[in-house]
Amino acid sequence: MVTNRYAVYVLWPLLLLVFLALFLAVTLHSFVDWLDSKRIKHWVSQWVVIGSLVLVLGVGMALLVPALINQAVNFSREYATIERIWLKPFLREGVSEKHDLQQDKAFGEKN
């Protein structure tokens, strides 16, 4: 029983991809069939569906990537403030300074 759970745990990323591919194939096949019923050649129907899918993914990425870059830039600018407000209260007094000194020694920085 434990080995079955472990196998599912290890193989879950692969199984997820297989299920997603099957879902996508079945869904897109219905659109191809619908276009075929409109007397469009099968290969043209396939290319129209694939092109539409690529277009939708491309537009989605074009809208998503600039927003993600903007968020990363803002986060990197505000990291010191975030660290001071959110992280420092959870650290014991002096632990952060010791850690900073150890980091300096590890990376060969001189004070």
Image: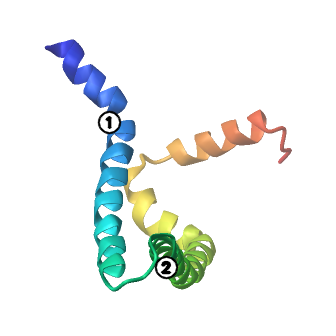
Circle 1 packing at 10 Å, graded few (<14), some (14-19), many (20+), is few
Quadrant of res 106: top right
Question: What is the spatial separation of the Cα atoms under label 1 and label 2, in whole angstroms?
Answer: 32 Å
Q: Position of residue 10 (x, y in %)?
A: 35, 27
Instruction: Please name the residue shown 33% across and 65% down the image.
Output: 29
Q: Amino acid at mark 2?
A: Val
Horizontal relation, residue 71 to residue 88: left or right: right
Q: Position of residue 87 (x, y in %)?
A: 43, 58
111 shown above or below 28: above
Q: Which element type, helix, strand or loop, lies under badge 2?
A: helix
Sequence-wise, which precedes: disc 1 or disc 2? 1
From the top left corner, tell me how far across and down residue 96 is, in percent.
54, 47
What residue appears at the point 36 percent right and 80 percent down from the top-left corner? 35
Along the viewing direction, whichever of 30 and 75 lies nearer the viewer: 30
The residue pinned by badge 1 equals: 12
Query: Taking 64 as reference, is 15 above or below it?
Result: above
Q: Mark 2 highlights which residue?
A: 48
Q: Which residue is at the front of the view, 6 or 107?
A: 6
Identity of the residue drawn at 36% across and 72% down? 32
In this figure, what is the number of numbered marks?
2
